[in-house]
Image: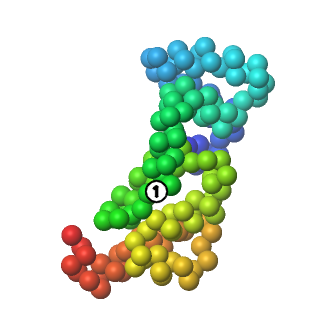
Amino acid sequence: MEMIFKVLECTDTQKLIYTGFQLQDEVAAWWKSTKPNLEVTHPNPTWEQFKEVFFRNYFPESFRDEKEVEFMALTQGSKSVLDYQQQFEDLFHFTPEHMRSDACKSKKFEKGVKPEISVMLAILDIQSYAQMVQKTKTMEDRLKEKNPILQG
């Protein structure tokens, strides 16, 4: 949904309206009862505030802590860059607030890639996460072209 919000350049109010429309069954009931409480403490709730109450309700603190530890230890290992990126983004939701800037996200991603790619990325000054992912995928493709054994 966040990718759609970015493309449509939605305001927080629009995000909450669209999200409320998408929720179904028990989650829709949860939001119907939670929204008034959130609006009491935050008259104009933001998307970040919605996510905070959502995650608090559906992901207990122990689960979030476990996922944060998993994220901090995440490396590419034998995975493709695409698979590493997918796992990275799945776990990124559980990162501490101080690591959420695009530059920190980019740096964490870089630190987790295979050493033969990381050494090439280190000489570049990439601050953007999207650019980091793209350059990493390009480098992986180039390494596979040079060494067909890696293509499996």
- Residue bearing mark 1: 73
Task: Tell whether 82 sits left or right of 11.
Answer: left
Task: Tell whether 125 sits left or right of 58.
Answer: right
How many numbered marks appear? Answer: 1
Mark 1: secondary structure: helix
Residue 145 visible to the viewer: yes
Residue 46 percent across, percent down from the top left: 70, 34
Q: Residue at x 41, y 53 (%)?
A: 86
- Hey, which quadrant is residue 30 in on the image? top right
Residue 123 percent across, percent down from the top left: 56, 83
The amino acid marked with disc number 1 is Ala
Q: Residue at x 61, y 47 (%)?
A: 96
Q: Residue at x 50, y 63 (%)?
A: 109
The residue closer to the viewer here, 71 or 62, is 62
The residue closer to the viewer here, 8 or 44, is 44
Q: Is residue 36 above or below residue 89?
A: above
Counting other residues with Cα less than 10 Å from the Cα at mark 1, is it few (<14), some (14-19), or many (20 or more)? few
Q: Quadrant of the C terminus?
A: bottom left
Residue 38 percent across, percent down from the top left: 70, 22
Task: Tell whether 124 sits left or right of 71.
Answer: right
Residue 14 visible to the viewer: no
Q: Is residue 151 above or below residue 104?
A: below
Residue 21 percent across, percent down from the top left: 54, 25
- Hey, which quadrant is residue 124 in on the image? bottom right
Q: Residue at x 34, y 80 (%)?
A: 143
Image coloring type: rainbow
Q: Is residue 10 above or below residue 35?
A: below
- Hey, which quadrant is residue 128 in on the image? bottom right
Q: Is residue 52 above or below residue 79?
A: above
